[in-house]
Structures are given as structure tokens and as C-alpha cells.
Amino acid sequence: MAPRKKTNRRAFLRGAATASLGAMAARGATAQAPDPLITDPQPWAQGLGDGVDVTPYGLPIRFEDDVVRRNVPWLTADTISSINFTPIHALDGTITPQGCAFERHHSGAIELSKQDYRLMLNGLVDRPLVFTYADLERFPRENHVYFCECAANSGMEWAGAQLNGAQFTHGMIHNMEYTGVPLRLLLEEAGYDTAGKWVYVEGADASSNGRSIPMDKALDDVLVAFKANGEALRKEHGYPVRLVVPGWEGNLWVKWLRRIEVTDAPVESREETSKYTDTLADGTSRKWTWEMDAKSVITAPSPQSPVPHGAGPLVITGLAWSGRGAITRVDVSTDGGASWQTARLAQPGTPMALTRFYLDVQWDGAEMLLQSRAMDDTGYVQPTKTQLRDVRGLNSIYHNNGIQTWWLHKDGSVENVEVS
Ligand SMILES: Nc1nc2c(c(=O)[nH]1)N[C@H]1C(S)=C(S)[C@@H](COP(=O)(O)O)O[C@H]1N2
Ligand SMILES: [Mo]
């Protein structure tokens, strides 16, 4: 799975050997032979490029066509009730383009137009209401950047290192800027009853993916969203309207949102009983584990993003997030957790959104055991897998936020291993 760029690397080292000493440690080697890419006229400068309308809506250039969502075929019986993974090993910054943001469907991605869209708000309210898409556009709206992480992210890694790539171990996550109407405004419009302690939300797809949400959360920061990263939601993310439930597990982020019922008790639906509960060592299960605890992963170097350049300057980078607040600090270890260095945050952490971190090191070319650990503004520190298993046992699938280890080999290749 890990693309090993051995030929390229050897070619580079041969070139570097003939170049000046120290070139290997520099960020760009000084070549001695004339470089035809500089000295010769190139085809792209000898003709004209595409006109402005050749691509009315642009896609990434073909050289980047390996930066795509991928699934793991053996995980699910088919691709309809399935999941794929964001290529986090190849992205930088924090915003996930919709085109490569992971998808999780229980009964496939449906096509629902704005014209056919209806949102019902019923139950314990003074006035049951139905909103069209155009109605929603007339409520005051807000913009917020939030991550959405499936509770099953890293679930395959509970018993030990399994999938060889950050995309597969940690890629059930995306981070977008949402535009939407606070759910509170719709509840106020309908006049919710004080006996209404919960809302039950469901989608228009065959699975409906119904979930109960406590009223406190519904009135706090939940958004009825229709734009992501400035444009309409993509079909696979719930076009035309999805729920955004900041910091809470992805399953609550109902897509193709069709109904919100104010209730006095949780529904205890399939998705919150037989699924998305956490079975402990003694066989009992925790429920209502909504928040996504602080977590981080090094995205490069990682198995799909090996080091192509040998010893010298090396950028170690990754993502950190917390469903309970903002990331305040990320530490990186190069020796499997024996010692830690505090990484540089590209931007100060913001609540319930991805934070990018960097550690710029001089790599001596020796193997490293790379780890990262996140801390949030509640004082919480991301646990080791041993600490997590001490509390949760080995029966769990969901909510694995344990520290990940990548083994960087001398040849620059990287492997998923466990140091617990
Ligand atoms: N209507 C509906 N909403 C849904 C789902 C679904 O299958 N149907 N899947 C849920 C799950 S389990 C997750 S993790 C998120 C994934 O959102 P995404 O597909 O935009 O990544 O959507 C949630 N909302
Ligand atoms: Mo999920």
C-alpha cells in the first residue's frame, strides 16, 4: 500500500553525491550539470494553455488523481451501507474539500432536490411546522468551521495495528465551514414545549438514521446547514440540508434532514442502542457517548506519505481535534513516547474544529517511532492505547482516541505499529 519511491530516492542521492557537500542537508540541492528543465524551452511555454471556460467547474489536476477517498472492501458487505476515508495523508491545512471528504451511508447517497425538500418540525410544539428550502433561507444564518468524525474512526485499531495508512486509520473525519440556521431558531419558531427534553432527528433516505439529541445541545450550537466550504452541500454529504452537531459523533449529523420531533424522552433507536454504544470488558455497554474526545494523528510522514529525501530537514505534520473544546497543545514524540517535544500549531485551536500542527526537525536518518498527543482546553490529554484499554477493555469499536504510532524506517518508508 505504501508507495515506496526507491528509484527516485536513489537518483536523488546519486545526484547529491556529485553536488557540493552539505547539499544533502539543504532543502534544495545545487545541481552541477545544467538542468534541461531550466535551460531548454518547455512545451508548456511554446503553445497556449486552456481557455477560461474549458473547465466550468474545476477538478484537481490529473497529477493529483491519487488524492481521493478510498474504501476498505473487506470492512463492509457492499458499498451501499458502507464508509470510505478522507485522504488526510495527502492534505494540508485544516479544511477538507468536499470532493474528497469521507462518506458514510446506511442506505446509499440519495438525490433530493431543493424543490422536493421538506423539513417537518413536530411533537411537543405549539405550532407543528413544515419548512421548504426557501423558508430556511429566510432565517438568520451563521458560519462555523467544525470537524465531523464518525465514532467508528480508528475502530479497527482497537486490538492492535491493522490498517497501513493514516487515511484508513484516521480518515473517517472531515472539517468544513458550514453555513446554516441555528436549530434553536426553528424550535423557537415552532414554540417548543418545556416538557420537550429531547429532539428526534431523521433523514429522508431509506435508513432514516434517526437519533435522539438532548434539548440542551439542540438549543446550544446545532446547525441546520445547507452550505459547506461556501457552496451547496454535495449529494453525498446530505444535499440540500444536513444537521451539524458540533463536537459530537458523526452519526448524529443527519443528512437529507427531513424531520425533527420534540419529545419528552429519547427514542432509543437502532442507531443509539445496537449501534454507536460502547461494549465494555464485562459485556455491559455505555450509551450516550456523544462527544468525540481529544485525538490527533501524524498525517506525514505516514505509511502512504513516506519520506522521499533522506537525512536532513524534515517536516512532521498532523491534525488534532477535540469535541469538547479547542486544542491548546500537541506534543510529538520521535522515540515511541519516551520523550516529547511541543509542536507548533499553524493557527490557535478553535472549538470543535481541526487544528494543524508541525514539528520541523533535522532527521539524522535513523529510524523513528512517531507519535502525537493532543491536549484540549478542558485539560484533557489524549490517552495511550493501554490507558484506553484499562478503562474500556477490548470489546469496543467506537471512540478509539488512543495515541497512534508510525514506524519510520531508514529508507523513508513508514509502517503502522503499536507502542502502547
Ligand atoms: N440520513 C443519514 N444521515 C447520516 C447517515 C446516513 O446513513 N443517513 N450516516 C451518519 C454517519 S454514521 C456519519 S459518520 C455521518 C457521515 O457524514 P458524511 O457522509 O458527510 O461524511 O453522517 C451521518 N448521517
Ligand atoms: Mo458514523
Image (cartoon, helix red, strand yellow):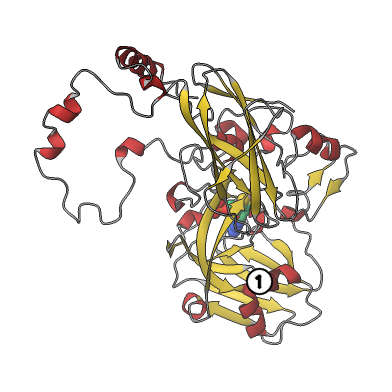
Locate residue 315, reporting x and y percent: 49, 34
Q: Is residue 133 left or right of residue 46?
A: right
> Residue at 64% across / 27% down in the picture?
162
**Pick the front one: 147 or 9:** 9
Q: In this view, does 63 lie to the left or right of 412?
A: left
**Which residue, as the protein is rendered here, is positioned at the far left?**
46
How many numbered marks does the figure carry?
1
> Residue at 48% across / 48% down in the picture?
93
Q: Can residue 225 be seen in this view?
A: yes
Badge 1 marks a residue whose secondary structure is: strand
Locate residue 234, reporting x and y percent: 45, 57
> Residue at 26% across / 56% down in the picture?
56
**Pick the front one: 172 or 220:** 220
Q: Mark 1 points at which residue?
A: 260
Locate residue 418, reporting x and y percent: 69, 26
Image quadrant of residue 126? bottom right
Image quarter of the C terminus: top right
Image quadrant of residue 73? top right
| Residue type, label 1 | Ile
**Pick the front one: 86 or 212:** 86
Instruction: Tell me which image quadrant ligand 1 sits in.
Output: bottom right
Image quadrant of residue 372? top right
Residue 210 against residue 420 in the figure, above or below: below
